[in-house]
Image: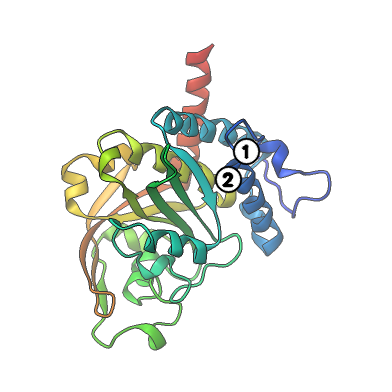
Amino acid sequence: MRDRISSPPGEDFIPEQIFPTAVGSVWIRNIAVAIGACASSGESAAMTSVVDLLHVSRFIQGYEAAAAQKGIRLTLGTDFHEYVSITRATATKGPTYPNFRPDRSPIGSGEGFWMVGMDRSNNVAVLQAVRLYDLSRSNFAEHLESLKAFYADPARHAHPEDACTCRAPSAKKMSGKVAYHGDGWVRRDFRGAGMPGIMAGIAFGVSFAMWGPDFVCGLVAQWLIDKGVVSQYGYAHHERAGSVLRLVEEDIVDDDWLIWLTGEELRSRVVRQEEAGLMLAS
Protein backbone atom coordinates (compact mmCIF):
# COMPACT_ATOMS: atom_id res chain seq x y z
CA MET A 1 0.00 0.00 0.00
CA ARG A 2 1.45 3.35 -1.01
CA ASP A 3 1.98 6.04 1.62
CA ARG A 4 -0.81 8.56 2.14
CA ILE A 5 -1.12 11.76 4.14
CA SER A 6 -3.56 10.54 6.77
CA SER A 7 -4.14 13.82 8.58
CA PRO A 8 -4.59 17.44 7.46
CA PRO A 9 -1.23 18.97 6.46
CA GLY A 10 0.36 21.02 9.21
CA GLU A 11 2.66 23.98 9.04
CA ASP A 12 5.46 21.86 7.60
CA PHE A 13 3.39 20.88 4.54
CA ILE A 14 3.02 23.68 2.02
CA PRO A 15 1.06 22.65 -1.08
CA GLU A 16 2.77 25.34 -3.16
CA GLN A 17 6.03 23.44 -2.64
CA ILE A 18 4.40 20.48 -4.38
CA PHE A 19 2.86 22.56 -7.18
CA PRO A 20 5.54 25.19 -7.88
CA THR A 21 4.39 28.24 -9.80
CA ALA A 22 6.02 28.51 -13.20
CA VAL A 23 6.01 31.60 -15.42
CA GLY A 24 2.48 31.97 -16.75
CA SER A 25 1.26 29.20 -14.41
CA VAL A 26 -0.36 31.10 -11.56
CA TRP A 27 -3.34 28.76 -11.81
CA ILE A 28 -1.24 25.94 -10.36
CA ARG A 29 -1.32 27.84 -7.06
CA ASN A 30 -5.09 27.46 -7.18
CA ILE A 31 -4.67 23.70 -7.34
CA ALA A 32 -2.57 23.84 -4.20
CA VAL A 33 -5.18 25.98 -2.45
CA ALA A 34 -7.91 23.56 -3.51
CA ILE A 35 -5.93 20.61 -2.17
CA GLY A 36 -5.44 22.44 1.12
CA ALA A 37 -9.19 23.17 1.30
CA CYS A 38 -9.92 19.53 0.59
CA ALA A 39 -7.70 18.45 3.48
CA SER A 40 -9.01 21.03 5.93
CA SER A 41 -12.61 20.09 5.13
CA GLY A 42 -12.07 16.51 6.25
CA GLU A 43 -11.07 14.95 2.93
CA SER A 44 -7.46 14.40 3.99
CA ALA A 45 -7.74 10.65 3.47
CA ALA A 46 -8.09 11.37 -0.24
CA MET A 47 -4.70 13.04 -0.37
CA THR A 48 -2.12 11.24 -2.43
CA SER A 49 1.47 10.75 -1.32
CA VAL A 50 4.03 13.49 -1.77
CA VAL A 51 5.70 11.39 -4.46
CA ASP A 52 2.40 11.13 -6.32
CA LEU A 53 1.89 14.88 -6.02
CA LEU A 54 5.28 15.52 -7.58
CA HIS A 55 4.27 13.28 -10.48
CA VAL A 56 0.95 15.13 -10.77
CA SER A 57 2.66 18.52 -10.80
CA ARG A 58 4.82 17.55 -13.77
CA PHE A 59 1.92 15.74 -15.46
CA ILE A 60 -0.33 18.81 -15.29
CA GLN A 61 2.36 21.24 -16.37
CA GLY A 62 2.94 19.11 -19.46
CA TYR A 63 -0.67 19.60 -20.51
CA GLU A 64 -0.55 23.29 -19.62
CA ALA A 65 2.46 23.67 -21.92
CA ALA A 66 0.60 21.86 -24.72
CA ALA A 67 -2.31 24.30 -24.32
CA ALA A 68 0.05 27.28 -24.37
CA GLN A 69 1.50 26.07 -27.67
CA LYS A 70 -2.01 26.32 -29.11
CA GLY A 71 -2.42 29.85 -27.78
CA ILE A 72 -4.55 28.92 -24.77
CA ARG A 73 -3.93 30.21 -21.23
CA LEU A 74 -5.60 27.99 -18.63
CA THR A 75 -7.07 29.06 -15.30
CA LEU A 76 -8.51 26.89 -12.55
CA GLY A 77 -11.17 27.97 -10.06
CA THR A 78 -13.42 26.60 -7.34
CA ASP A 79 -16.13 29.28 -7.06
CA PHE A 80 -19.03 27.89 -9.10
CA HIS A 81 -20.99 31.14 -8.93
CA GLU A 82 -18.12 32.66 -10.90
CA TYR A 83 -18.07 29.66 -13.25
CA VAL A 84 -21.77 30.00 -14.07
CA SER A 85 -21.33 33.72 -14.72
CA ILE A 86 -18.55 32.85 -17.21
CA THR A 87 -20.57 30.17 -18.97
CA ARG A 88 -23.64 32.39 -19.25
CA ALA A 89 -21.54 35.13 -20.83
CA THR A 90 -20.10 32.70 -23.39
CA ALA A 91 -22.45 33.22 -26.32
CA THR A 92 -22.05 29.97 -28.24
CA LYS A 93 -21.96 27.61 -25.24
CA GLY A 94 -25.16 25.82 -24.25
CA PRO A 95 -26.57 26.17 -20.73
CA THR A 96 -24.61 24.63 -17.88
CA TYR A 97 -26.41 21.58 -16.48
CA PRO A 98 -27.71 21.84 -12.91
CA ASN A 99 -24.92 19.48 -11.70
CA PHE A 100 -22.58 22.47 -11.74
CA ARG A 101 -25.00 25.26 -10.81
CA PRO A 102 -24.98 26.33 -7.15
CA ASP A 103 -28.64 27.35 -7.33
CA ARG A 104 -29.60 23.71 -7.90
CA SER A 105 -26.66 21.63 -6.69
CA PRO A 106 -24.26 23.47 -4.35
CA ILE A 107 -20.63 22.34 -4.44
CA GLY A 108 -18.82 22.65 -1.12
CA SER A 109 -15.24 23.68 -0.49
CA GLY A 110 -12.87 21.05 -1.82
CA GLU A 111 -15.66 19.24 -3.70
CA GLY A 112 -15.21 20.63 -7.19
CA PHE A 113 -13.19 22.73 -9.61
CA TRP A 114 -13.54 24.22 -13.07
CA MET A 115 -11.23 25.33 -15.84
CA VAL A 116 -11.42 28.07 -18.41
CA GLY A 117 -9.02 28.54 -21.31
CA MET A 118 -8.53 32.03 -22.76
CA ASP A 119 -7.14 32.77 -26.22
CA ARG A 120 -4.52 35.42 -27.02
CA SER A 121 -7.28 38.04 -27.21
CA ASN A 122 -8.44 37.09 -23.71
CA ASN A 123 -11.67 35.54 -24.97
CA VAL A 124 -13.06 32.26 -23.61
CA ALA A 125 -12.10 29.33 -25.83
CA VAL A 126 -12.54 26.21 -23.67
CA LEU A 127 -14.48 25.27 -20.53
CA GLN A 128 -15.02 22.23 -18.33
CA ALA A 129 -15.89 21.33 -14.73
CA VAL A 130 -15.41 18.44 -12.30
CA ARG A 131 -17.18 17.68 -9.03
CA LEU A 132 -16.92 14.92 -6.44
CA TYR A 133 -19.90 12.78 -5.49
CA ASP A 134 -19.76 10.92 -2.18
CA LEU A 135 -21.46 7.65 -3.09
CA SER A 136 -20.24 5.63 -0.11
CA ARG A 137 -23.83 4.57 0.56
CA SER A 138 -25.06 4.56 -3.00
CA ASN A 139 -23.84 4.10 -6.58
CA PHE A 140 -23.75 6.23 -9.70
CA ALA A 141 -26.80 4.60 -11.32
CA GLU A 142 -28.89 5.22 -8.21
CA HIS A 143 -27.57 8.77 -7.93
CA LEU A 144 -28.66 9.51 -11.49
CA GLU A 145 -32.07 7.86 -11.26
CA SER A 146 -32.90 9.62 -7.98
CA LEU A 147 -32.03 12.92 -9.73
CA LYS A 148 -29.65 13.72 -6.86
CA ALA A 149 -26.86 13.96 -9.44
CA PHE A 150 -28.61 17.06 -10.78
CA TYR A 151 -30.42 18.55 -7.78
CA ALA A 152 -29.39 18.71 -4.14
CA ASP A 153 -33.10 18.54 -3.29
CA PRO A 154 -35.06 16.85 -6.11
CA ALA A 155 -38.32 17.18 -4.17
CA ARG A 156 -37.90 20.94 -4.25
CA HIS A 157 -36.31 21.58 -7.65
CA ALA A 158 -37.27 18.72 -9.98
CA HIS A 159 -40.33 18.96 -12.23
CA PRO A 160 -42.91 16.17 -11.69
CA GLU A 161 -42.13 14.84 -15.17
CA ASP A 162 -38.34 14.87 -14.74
CA ALA A 163 -36.81 11.41 -15.05
CA CYS A 164 -33.48 9.65 -15.54
CA THR A 165 -32.90 6.01 -16.41
CA CYS A 166 -29.44 4.44 -16.24
CA ARG A 167 -29.09 1.06 -17.95
CA ALA A 168 -25.29 0.97 -18.12
CA PRO A 169 -24.43 -2.10 -16.00
CA SER A 170 -21.16 -0.72 -14.68
CA ALA A 171 -22.82 2.38 -13.20
CA LYS A 172 -24.25 0.20 -10.42
CA LYS A 173 -20.70 -0.78 -9.45
CA MET A 174 -19.46 2.81 -9.17
CA SER A 175 -19.51 3.73 -5.51
CA GLY A 176 -17.28 5.52 -3.02
CA LYS A 177 -15.63 8.70 -4.25
CA VAL A 178 -16.83 9.34 -7.80
CA ALA A 179 -15.42 12.34 -9.69
CA TYR A 180 -17.86 13.54 -12.35
CA HIS A 181 -16.29 15.31 -15.35
CA GLY A 182 -18.63 17.40 -17.49
CA ASP A 183 -19.78 20.68 -19.03
CA GLY A 184 -16.98 20.46 -21.59
CA TRP A 185 -17.02 23.03 -24.38
CA VAL A 186 -14.49 23.98 -27.05
CA ARG A 187 -14.98 27.03 -29.27
CA ARG A 188 -15.41 26.16 -32.92
CA ASP A 189 -12.08 27.61 -34.09
CA PHE A 190 -10.19 25.40 -31.60
CA ARG A 191 -11.98 22.16 -32.44
CA GLY A 192 -9.89 19.47 -34.09
CA ALA A 193 -6.76 20.81 -32.36
CA GLY A 194 -6.55 18.24 -29.57
CA MET A 195 -8.00 20.45 -26.83
CA PRO A 196 -10.36 17.76 -25.40
CA GLY A 197 -7.36 15.56 -24.58
CA ILE A 198 -5.50 18.45 -22.97
CA MET A 199 -8.45 19.46 -20.83
CA ALA A 200 -9.21 15.87 -19.84
CA GLY A 201 -5.57 15.32 -18.89
CA ILE A 202 -5.65 18.28 -16.54
CA ALA A 203 -9.01 17.16 -15.12
CA PHE A 204 -7.52 13.72 -14.43
CA GLY A 205 -4.42 15.16 -12.77
CA VAL A 206 -6.24 17.61 -10.52
CA SER A 207 -8.92 15.04 -9.57
CA PHE A 208 -6.23 12.54 -8.63
CA ALA A 209 -4.34 15.09 -6.54
CA MET A 210 -7.39 16.44 -4.73
CA TRP A 211 -9.39 13.28 -4.09
CA GLY A 212 -7.74 10.06 -5.23
CA PRO A 213 -11.22 8.99 -6.41
CA ASP A 214 -12.47 5.43 -6.79
CA PHE A 215 -13.81 6.38 -10.22
CA VAL A 216 -13.74 9.32 -12.60
CA CYS A 217 -16.56 9.38 -15.13
CA GLY A 218 -18.62 11.41 -17.56
CA LEU A 219 -21.74 11.25 -19.70
CA VAL A 220 -21.41 11.96 -23.42
CA ALA A 221 -23.54 11.98 -26.55
CA GLN A 222 -23.08 9.11 -28.99
CA TRP A 223 -21.68 11.39 -31.69
CA LEU A 224 -18.67 12.06 -29.46
CA ILE A 225 -18.06 8.30 -29.40
CA ASP A 226 -18.61 7.94 -33.16
CA LYS A 227 -16.30 10.82 -34.10
CA GLY A 228 -13.50 9.65 -31.82
CA VAL A 229 -13.63 12.68 -29.54
CA VAL A 230 -14.00 10.47 -26.47
CA SER A 231 -10.90 8.52 -27.45
CA GLN A 232 -8.99 11.82 -27.12
CA TYR A 233 -10.17 12.13 -23.52
CA GLY A 234 -8.32 8.99 -22.49
CA TYR A 235 -11.20 7.14 -20.86
CA ALA A 236 -10.68 3.38 -20.90
CA HIS A 237 -14.33 2.26 -20.82
CA HIS A 238 -17.70 3.23 -22.23
CA GLU A 239 -21.24 1.83 -22.12
CA ARG A 240 -24.43 2.95 -23.81
CA ALA A 241 -27.54 4.16 -21.96
CA GLY A 242 -25.58 5.74 -19.14
CA SER A 243 -28.22 8.43 -18.77
CA VAL A 244 -31.57 8.61 -20.56
CA LEU A 245 -32.54 11.97 -19.14
CA ARG A 246 -35.41 14.42 -19.23
CA LEU A 247 -35.33 17.66 -17.23
CA VAL A 248 -38.42 19.61 -18.23
CA GLU A 249 -37.65 23.08 -16.89
CA GLU A 250 -34.05 22.84 -18.11
CA ASP A 251 -35.27 21.83 -21.60
CA ILE A 252 -32.89 18.85 -21.48
CA VAL A 253 -33.53 15.56 -23.29
CA ASP A 254 -30.46 13.29 -23.47
CA ASP A 255 -29.48 9.72 -24.23
CA ASP A 256 -25.84 9.63 -23.16
CA TRP A 257 -23.11 7.04 -22.91
CA LEU A 258 -21.23 6.45 -19.66
CA ILE A 259 -17.43 6.79 -19.87
CA TRP A 260 -15.05 6.08 -16.98
CA LEU A 261 -11.72 5.13 -15.47
CA THR A 262 -11.22 3.25 -12.23
CA GLY A 263 -9.14 4.87 -9.51
CA GLU A 264 -6.19 2.60 -10.22
CA GLU A 265 -6.42 3.32 -13.94
CA LEU A 266 -6.44 7.03 -13.14
CA ARG A 267 -3.34 6.74 -10.98
CA SER A 268 -1.61 4.63 -13.62
CA ARG A 269 -2.44 7.19 -16.31
CA VAL A 270 -1.09 10.10 -14.29
CA VAL A 271 2.05 8.50 -12.84
CA ARG A 272 3.11 6.20 -15.68
CA GLN A 273 2.46 8.73 -18.43
CA GLU A 274 4.52 11.32 -16.56
CA GLU A 275 7.32 8.78 -16.03
CA ALA A 276 7.24 7.88 -19.73
CA GLY A 277 7.53 11.56 -20.61
CA LEU A 278 10.60 11.93 -18.40
CA MET A 279 12.21 8.88 -20.00
CA LEU A 280 11.60 10.28 -23.49
CA ALA A 281 13.03 13.64 -22.43
CA SER A 282 16.19 12.11 -20.94
Residue 185 image point, x, y percent:
32, 51
Crowdedness of circle 1 by 10 Å Cα count: few (<14), some, many (20+)? many
Crowdedness of circle 2 by 10 Å Cα count: few (<14), some, many (20+)? many
Q: Is residue 193 left or right of residue 8?
A: left
Q: Residue 209 shows which numbered tag?
A: 2
How is the model colour-coded?
rainbow
Q: Nearer the viewer, residue 154 or 85?
A: 85
- What's under tag 2, amino acid-wise? Ala
Residue under label 1, please give it: 53
Q: Are marks 1 and 2 in contact (CB under 8 Å)?
A: yes
Q: How many marks?
A: 2
Q: Is residue 71 left or right of residue 41?
A: left
Quarter assignment of residue 19: top right
Q: Residue at x 69, y 53 (%)?
A: 36
Q: Is residue 98 left or right of residue 238?
A: right
Q: CA distance from mark 1 to mark 2?
A: 6 Å
Quarter assignment of residue 157: bottom left
